[in-house]
Image: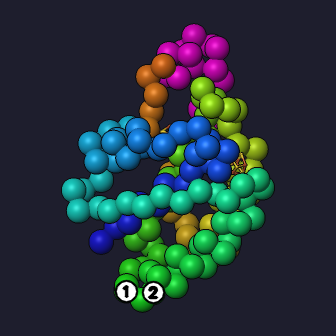
Amino acid sequence: MKLIVIIQCEDVVKRCSGFLCMRDFYDRKGKFENYDSDVRYMTMTCGGCCGNLLTPKLENLGMRLKKENIEKDDVIFHFASCICSDNFHRSPCPFMNRMKALLSRKGFYNVVLGTHISQKAEAKRQAGFYKKWE
Ligand code: SF4
Ligand code: SF4
């Protein structure tokens, strides 16, 4: 069993419900297109800048996974697209690499950049208005 964990920006969730990330997960679009139908997902926020509060969340998750006999290798983290790219809500997160390091310190090594891919943001990237994906 594989589990996707979408990490959302604590700032952006004050403005965004995360609906499009959820929709694209179930529709297997964007960065989710290659997952099998039995893959499950959950979301968590980073906890706020600079991502330090991810650590207790990851410890909690690790404990729950152990109780459910789910291997950490079967967990794939996705940083929401609004963390890794220019977008309507804000600039990319300056702490992304730090958060990746926090994940690996807790034994989570599978990280994908992105979730829902906004067509409007893609068009702005093509036009040079937004920088390319980081
Ligand atoms: S990628 Fe889009 S839908 Fe997903 S959390 Fe960020 S702003 Fe919301
Ligand atoms: S650490 Fe990054 S993802 Fe988290 S609130 Fe700050 S900018 Fe957003």
The answer to whether marks 2 and 1 mark residues whose Cβ atoms lie closer than 8 Å is yes
Q: In front: 112, or 20?
A: 20
**How far across and how far down the image is residue 65, in percent?**
44, 81
Give the magenta-colored segment's residue range: 121-134
Residue at the spot 29% in from the left edge and 61% down from the top edge? 39
Q: In front: 10, or 94?
A: 10
As drawn, 121 above or below 12: above
What colouring method underlies this structural image? rainbow
- Judging by the rendered image, the residue that carries numbered circle 2 is 66
- Which element is circle 1 on? loop
- Judging by the rendered image, the residue that carries numbered circle 1 is 69
Classify residue 121 as left or right of residue 71.
Answer: right
- Residue 102 visible within the image: no
Q: Report how many numbered discs are placed on residues in the image.
A: 2
Instruction: Spot the residue most to the top.
Output: 127
- Which element is circle 2 on? helix
